[in-house]
Amino acid sequence: MTVTLADVAARAQVSPATVSRVLNGNYPVAAATRERVLRAVDDLDYVLNGQASALAAATSDLVGILVNDIADPFFGIMAGAAQSQIGGPEGAGAGRAGGEKLAIVCNTGGSPERELTYLTLLQRQRAAAVILTGGAIEDPEHSAAVAAKLAKLADGGARVVLCGRPPLELPGGGEAVAAALAFDNRGGARRLTEHLLTLGHQRIAYVAGPVERTTTRHRLESHRDAMEAAGLGDAVDALTVHGPYDRRSGYDATLELLRREPALTAVVAANDTVALGACAALREQGRSIPDDVSVAGFDDLPFSADAMPALTTVRLPLHEAGARAGRLAMGREAAPAGGIATVPADLVVRGSTAAARG
Amino acid sequence: MTVTLADVAARAQVSPATVSRVLNGNYPVAAATRERVLRAVDDLDYVLNGQASALAAATSDLVGILVNDIADPFFGIMAGAAQSQIGGPEGAGAGRAGGEKLAIVCNTGGSPERELTYLTLLQRQRAAAVILTGGAIEDPEHSAAVAAKLAKLADGGARVVLCGRPPLELPGGGEAVAAALAFDNRGGARRLTEHLLTLGHQRIAYVAGPVERTTTRHRLESHRDAMEAAGLGDAVDALTVHGPYDRRSGYDATLELLRREPALTAVVAANDTVALGACAALREQGRSIPDDVSVAGFDDLPFSADAMPALTTVRLPLHEAGARAGRLAMGREAAPAGGIATVPADLVVRGSTAAARG
DNA sequence: ACGGCCGTAGCAAGCGCTTTCTATGCGCTA
DNA sequence: TAGCGCATAGAAAGCGCTTGCTACGGCCGT
């Protein structure tokens, strides 16, 4: 069967306690003894039992990263960056490597229930930290449930970090999170719409993300604000369609928008993936980009620069944000003042937007 | 402090054993008693301690999924699909939900050391299953180390599944893996090159993936075979460049290839991302696609259909394969005959390839 | 030379749960 | 009515590890 600490101890002619101390390196052990133990570990191919260790020490080396959709690079990039700060490539030996943690990426699929399920699972594993990424669902009941869970996790010693998700505004919720990195969705969206307005566009269609999501709402609200400031607020509702964050949604929504307003000259999409779908629909309808219609996305995912024409979009520093979230989760970086940091969202103008026709 | 089983037992006026049995539902408990226990659990907001539970029951509900690059949708899609079969959206209660497991996505970054580190970490957690995705590194020493680790994991009761990775050819390695799903990289690559040859291309450049990777080798070998069959084998080496699986690599390599052979009429890329980089380089050099140069990718990632022109590529059913790997890992599906299944790789012809000029 | 200290190692008590085995009470049959 | 079995609950022994405390030398100081 599996080799236990006791087996190693027997072979090295020492007590289990000594073996444990050698492995953890947190207690003086004579060099000769350590040698002997290490050799025994090696001979027996001993591997620590994580559960037993965690149980006895009342600590866990699991860090959970919750994402809405792991197949979406938006989340993949953040998760990868976070994980790079968490599961350092350090030790691989039998003992627990210093500070090394195991990152768990949990795919909620955007479902509130699964989000809670995973939070419970992480709580059950006494996770050392939890990182929540992406927009939150705007359901008071669910928000409260999440806040309660996070409070409990924090209470149990877990560091909770929000990445690309607005800070919780609930009683107790604020105290629970160690830090929140919020994307400047409002600012980015505003700058994007202003860019289009400056180019002379007026009939600007908007393919929004799923309803009841903070990200969706923030971006849409800023779009509306910018439009209103330009005296174009009335047209916004009629030229807005909601849908999921996928290509299909951009395609379908754009066809629908063209039906509603054949004379539209610009389409702003919820994100780059959606924007690509919009491009496909426009081309299929014989509109050229950007000559007939300008298209803009959001996020600046790697492929956006490769679209034809290259996509004008709002860059979100996903990698940096993810890495920072990882560091915060590990306690390797001090939390920003007030626990909240705003991550910039800069406009990146490329070929898919141009002056409005006529 | 945290609520324990004993606390619940005290409140429900029963023994800890009874509480455990109610939670696990694997032993008859009188309805009235169960009620009482459940209410106590609820009142106290009790959450099972995963480590203690796992330790006592000698089972873990962790399933590891190793990927080379989580930011790459190629892996994201597989991982997501696998996870959907693993962490079912079932129970979220205090007890352990039936068969529910926690999927861990581990990002190796393509580094052999980290691959081994994660394998050790998973072994330490006594993972219930491990899924390895993507191409393997072709270093005998490393392969042996991985095979040994896998054997040990399997020995400890973990189900090992390979997804998109060729079966191990080492002693003991074969026995260790429960199942292997191998992409038909050879067939796909052959069909792709044959497609180009049929279109009349002769000067076909090849942007290969990283050296020392099974995926790279298999695809390249088949390309070479097809070229040789057409009497074009001599030119292959001169028109092949290796690089990582990213856009930059495709861009740089294509510039280099154009320098070597300004008259090339087709570029085959290691994957779709690389192909996009190649497209960018070609366009920058004033070549039109597919009129001047045809371009083809591999994998058929979602954005490939949206490139301009849409990318001809080889479709890998990533979602299906990932899901199947997940099911195999959960023991919910019987292993294929011989433990190895070949996943088809079909040619998808789109706009980026056309008859060779002149 | 003796007491005390420091450097090491071992003992043993858990960590919170699962599970085997045992105990109890009840309903049923003969 | 006595006997038996079944359904249900509890006692207790771990699972493999960590760690506070104790034990034991040898070395130092005075």
Image (cartoon, coloured by chain):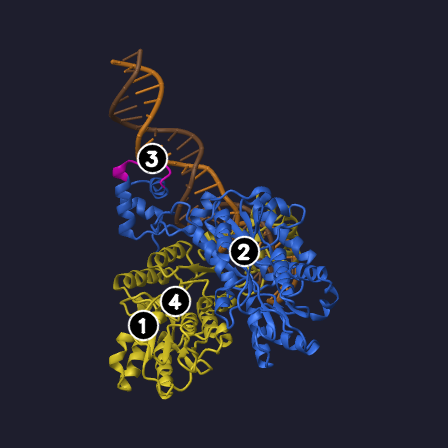
Chain colours: A blue, B yellow, C orange, D brown
Whether the residues at callouts 3 and 4 have beta carbons within 8 Å, the answer is: no
- Determine the chain carrying the residue at label 3: A
Numbered disc 2: secondary structure:
helix
The quarter of the picture where the C terminus of chain A appears is: bottom right
* The stretch drawn in magenta includes residue A163: no
Write down the quadrant of residue A118 in the picture: bottom right
Give the label, 3 or 4, closer to the camera. Answer: 4
Q: Which residue is tagged 2?
A: A121
**The disc labelled 1 sits on which kind of residue?**
Arg
Mark 1 vs mark 3: in front: 1
Residue B340 in the image, given as x and y percentages of width and height: 36, 75
Magenta highlight range? A25-33
Q: Image point 26% across, 47% down: which residue?
A: A39
| Helix, strand or loop under label 3 | loop
Give SS at disc 4.
Answer: loop
Q: Disc count in the image?
A: 4
Closest to the camera, between mark 2 and mark 4, is: 4
Query: Marks 1/4: CA distance?
Result: 21 Å
Report the Cα–Cα distance between label 1 and label 3: 63 Å
Q: Could you confirm whether marks 1 and 2 are on the same chain?
A: no
The residue singled out by tag 4 in the image is B245
Q: Nearer the viewer, mark 1 or mark 4?
A: 1
Side (left or right) of A131 relative to A29: right
Q: Amino acid at mark 4?
A: Tyr
Q: Which mark is residue B259?
A: 1
Q: Which residue is mark 3?
A: A28
Horizontal side of residue B190 vs B321, given as left or right: left
